Image (cartoon, coloured by chain):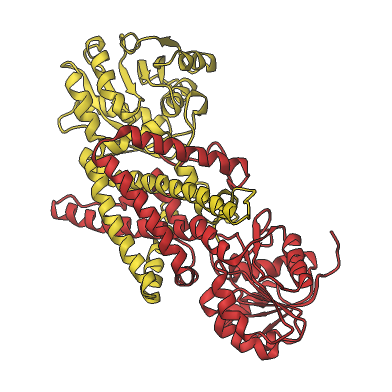
Chain colours: A red, B yellow
Amino acid sequence: MSDTPIYNRVAVIGLGLIGSSLCRRMKRDGLAAHVAGHARSAATRETSMALGFLDSVHESAADAVDDADLVVLCVPVGANAAVAEAIGPSLKSGATVTDVGSVKMAVIRDVGPHLPDGVHLVPGHPVAGTEHSGPESGFPELFEDRYCILTPAAGTDQKAVDRVSDLWQRAGSKVELLDAHHHDRVLGITSHLPHLIAYTIVGTASDLEHQLRREDTENGDLIETREVIKYSAGGFRDFTRIAASDPVMWRDIFLNNREAVLELLGRFVEDLTALQRSIRWGEGDALEDFFTRTRAVRRDVIDMKQAGSFNPTEREEE
Amino acid sequence: MSDTPIYNRVAVIGLGLIGSSLCRRMKRDGLAAHVAGHARSAATRETSMALGFLDSVHESAADAVDDADLVVLCVPVGANAAVAEAIGPSLKSGATVTDVGSVKMAVIRDVGPHLPDGVHLVPGHPVAGTEHSGPESGFPELFEDRYCILTPAAGTDQKAVDRVSDLWQRAGSKVELLDAHHHDRVLGITSHLPHLIAYTIVGTASDLEHQLRREDTENGDLIETREVIKYSAGGFRDFTRIAASDPVMWRDIFLNNREAVLELLGRFVEDLTALQRSIRWGEGDALEDFFTRTRAVRRDVIDMKQAGSFNPTEREEE
């Protein structure tokens, strides 16, 4: 691995968890000679400069991308169109625009039309993150050993793709190239649907808790503590972590991967209905067979070393 | 905390994760003068003796409970009735029977009728576990800082309840007393429904992966790797861990908490349908509001210190 910068000047638009983590990594490892940043909020811009992961900060996105060799869009995917429109005229010929969004067809649709000729679009998605948001929550190791998926259209300049790939590899990631439509479907099932379901059950539980408390209060049995939270180690806890992810980011993901999410949701509800029926009719064998099959999937996750901070004393259920 | 044993002789029926962890803790901390064990399988009995967490092992449950002051049922809840019937005649007067099952009404229904007069029933549920099963997977710290819920019927001998409570506290747990029916409803939402949903989505994803692979093969684009597993860090991973829990144990939980689970599932599907509709109609504000509300629940989990092995470098999603 070389120590020379991959880009002379990189502009990062959006300085939240992902954007600020990438800046930190680029500064730490000298991946860019100059890292310019822009965030809509003055507070975020100030915090980012104070945290020291930028060489320059700019009030407007258009100023930030001036003379940039690479522009990385790190805003919620719903904001991409407006940002692309704002920066389009300021992009220099030969520059590359990439992004970090969780949906890729929408990025091509929203960003592509605003890029002048001679500017390369290499959509990207680092499959990494935490449930925390904002410039303070980033850290340079965020992308270490995670996959980063690039979805350039056929015919995209190979050198532009290779340099973006190089950047992510030197940020610690394993880079994969996928068709954008295929990406949206695969991530729909591995990420978007799990988030939607986690959000739902946390909402269901939260409403129910208030109702349980009201019922018990009416019965003269006041619940002093928050029982749903208290006994969350039984499985619910893991869902609350996923459901704590950034609300605006996830709103935009669902709205911009609508077809895939709705189709996958249809499959999920079918499967859930089948299990519901097995429970109602006491079909123990069907339940046991299903649960035995899903157990095997976990072994595959562990075998592919995607199990995260797995350790035998992690406690989860009964 | 005293160093004297709480019970002279404890019999543990079922030597899996929970049973073997309790045995280990009792031996380590001298909570019982003698720990007798029984498991249906000869291999489990042999392994358990070899692991050294029992003073004696018995081929029949009835022999194991002979002269026991406390009997702890650690079998899947569907097996309780048969075990209770088998041990009933061998229980000595003044003995206490407890259990570790995740449903409590069913335990009272299945075990109660088989206990002779003068034997106390103190149903229990340590809210602790991992996704691993079997006598090798237990460890004495499993119950540390976890809740253990006891659901004795009104009028149960207070001394019997206090001693079971003492045992769990000395095993590291925080003991709470709850009404059995209320327990089943609260754990239905914090544990049973999350498991059902995790099992479902892992099944849905697994089926879809096979289909995606087939489609791509037909298109001449063979998928070499298992993409759903590969990109599981996007959220799916957390579900696979929950869905790796013991299939027989969970079959019995769903069959024995049927009414609560089906009722809660109805609420969940209603809420999911509402979100589905918001996605279909592009109602961004409704989605953002919902996700903002669920995010707050996570803060409560952290505030109540039920967040598990939480650390800021845990990675989860984009």
The answer, for residue B198, to whether it is visible in the render is yes
Position of A134 relative to B165 (above/below): below
Q: Residue at x 60, y 87 (%)?
A: A85
The residue nearer to you, when weighing A41 against A128, is: A128
Q: Residue at x 23, y 49 (%)?
A: B263
The residue nearer to you, when weighing A45 against B191, is: B191
Count all numbered tags in the image, as a single digit.
0
In the picture, measured across the screen, residue B295 lies left or right of residue A91, that is left
Location of the N terminus of chain A (image quadrant): bottom right
User: Residue A86 at x, y = what percent?
Assistant: 61, 88
Position of A60 relative to B180 (above/below): below
Report the residue that reaches farthest toward the bottom. A89
In the picture, measured across the screen, residue A312 lies left or right of residue A280, that is right
In the picture, measured across the screen, residue B61 lies left or right of residue B185, that is right
Location of the C terminus of chain A (image quadrant): top left
The answer, for residue A60, to whether it is visible in the render is no
Q: Residue at x 51, y 28 (%)?
A: B137
Quarter holding residue A25: bottom right
User: Residue B199 at x, y = what percent?
Assistant: 41, 44
User: Residue B74 at x, y = what percent?
Assistant: 36, 25
The residue nearer to you, when weighing B33 against A95, is: A95
The residue nearer to you, when weighing B295 against B131, is: B131
Quarter holding residue A204: bottom left
Q: Residue at x 17, y 15 (%)?
A: B116
Position of B3 relative to A101 (above/below): above
